Image (tube, rainbow, N blue to C red):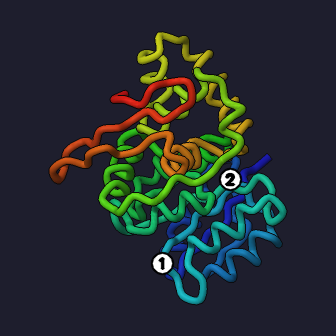
Amino acid sequence: MSLRILLVDDQALVRSGFRMLVEVQPGMEVVGEAANGEEAVAEARRTRPDVVLMDIRMPRMDGIEATRLITRADASPGCRVLLLTTYDLDEYVFRGLRAGASGFLLKDVAPEDLVRAIHVVAEGESLLSPSITRRLIEEFVRTPEAPPMSCPELASLTEREHEVLTLMGRGLANQEIAERLSLSMATVKTHVNRVFSKLRLRDRAQAVVVAYETGIVRPRDAGPAGSRPEYTWHGPGRDAGPW
């Protein structure tokens, strides 16, 4: 079956460019277009897309609010949203991930990378590379630290699953987690999937958000500009200290 794609951007020329690229790909079809967030929500409900390519800055309703509405379980089941941004670290990206987006792309993305990204998120993965995750974290730690949010489901995680969630929050890929914990890739993937299931997360992007908002991973010292922040473990059963 073809992947159903919804294009959302307030610039017709941008939508046209993405449409031409998507429609020449085998196994993909554009099922609709929208010029603002309100239209995007309506089109998502009407067309039931697999993936939405969503601009962030739009009139009437921005892409973040539209993402939140579209990714609600009762709105468009199984739909994944990729945020599109003109800037390398858009100020709205973290909010978008919190709203339920599966990742983000720059609008000048290479055609082959856009096609790959659509396939990645359609398969249930997150398009949030470790390097992007780390940079989002560095941007996040520049803002005042908020009190940790409550997440009762964390109590259901095993100690190993807490470790895996912590490392995901730090931006490590599965291979890096496997090396750090001396586990096989298959075992790491199993732990990752269990974390997603127990915390009811859609993908890795949401895992990073949860890790920060619940205080499992916290910036202890942002340090000078451009430096990597340090992190502190806050999971149960372990003394807090440098990870």
**Which residue is at 54% across, 76% downward?**
9
The amino acid type found where label 1 is placed reads Arg
Where does residue 231 sit, x and y in percent of width and height?
35, 37
Which residue is tagged 1? 57
**Which residue is at 67% across, 30% downward?**
157
Tell me: residue 172, above or below residue 16.
above
| Secondary structure at numbered mark 2 | strand
Q: Nearer the viewer, residue 167 or 158?
A: 158
Q: How many marks?
A: 2
Q: Earlier in the sequence, mark 2 or mark 1?
A: 2
In which quadrant of the rendered view does residue 162 lie?
Answer: top right
**Residue 106 in view here:** yes
As drawn, the label of residue 208 is none
Q: Is residue 48 left or right of residue 97?
A: right
Q: CA distance from mark 2 to mark 1?
A: 26 Å
Q: Is residue 63 left or right of residue 94?
A: right
**Which residue is at 76% across, 78% downward?**
42
Which residue is tagged 2? 28
Tell me if mark 1 has few (under 14), some (14-19) or many (20+) residues whose alpha carbon lies within 10 angstroms of its own: some
